[in-house]
Amino acid sequence: MTTSVTPVQETAIPEKRLYKSHIKFCNIHLPDGTRLDFKGGIYVTDNEDIIHFLDRAIAKNEYAGQIYIDPEARTITAEQENPLIALRKKFFEEFQKEQMAQLNRNNDRGTSQQGPLKAASTTDIAPVALGGTSSAQLMKSVAALTEQK
């Protein structure tokens, strides 16, 4: 079984305009009927028409200051908008490090020897469970237990 991991695109992350609202969950309707949903007090867009509409509305104070642009956070990246993108990138980088460590010939992984596979039975498991390896030791342990009673 081979594991396939899709690499994260290393393209420039476009920034989107970040609008905030004093009301955590609200919506605004554009003149064409499009609904803009503010979730958690924020709305993010890269649509130029919506940006123009909201900037004009904020400048004219059409929503009584309910919707505003934070001067400290005017834009947001895709990674900030969706933390899963950042996590996916982090996991892919970790996967690549592990893969490179596996392929490094200088790593000493030791040696091991595998014996023939033998189906286990109760006669094989009992001595091992008692800490010994032979049937004689098993019989000696059982005899010692019966004498104590």
Image: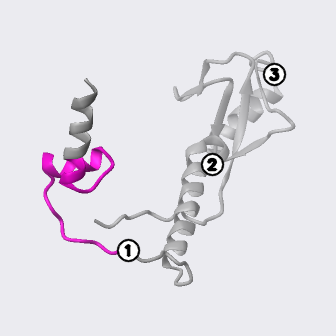
Residue at (79, 40) in percent of width and height: 74
Q: Which quadrant of the figure has residue 28?
A: top right
Q: Where does the C terminus fall, quadrant-wise?
A: top left
Give the camera-side residue of 17 and 132.
132
What's the CA distance linking mark 1 and mark 2? 48 Å
Location of mark 2 (residue)? 78
- Residue 91: image location, x then y, percent: 55, 55
Give the camera-side residue of 64 and 7.
7
Location of mark 1 (residue)? 112
Q: Magenta includes 96? A: no
Q: Are marks 1 and 2 in contact (CB under 8 Å)?
A: no
> Where are the magenta residues, as a range?
113-138
Q: As shown in the figure, which amino acid type bears the numbered disc 3?
A: Asn
Q: Secondary structure at mark 3?
A: loop
Q: Residues within 10 Å of mark 1 (few under 14, many from 20)?
A: few
Q: As shown in the figure, which amino acid type bears the numbered disc 1?
A: Ser
In the rendered view, how is the structure colored?
A: one colour
Q: Is residue 126 visible?
A: no
What's the CA distance linking mark 1 and mark 3? 75 Å
Query: Which comes before the other along the chain, label 2 or label 3?
Result: 3
Q: Is residue 23 visible?
A: yes
Image: 132 above or below 7: above
- Residue 86: image location, x then y, percent: 61, 50
Question: Viewer-nearest of labels 2 and 3?
Answer: 2
Q: Secondary structure at mark 1?
A: loop
Q: Where does the N terminus fall, quadrant-wise?
A: bottom left
Q: Residues within 10 Å of mark 3 (few under 14, many from 20)?
A: few
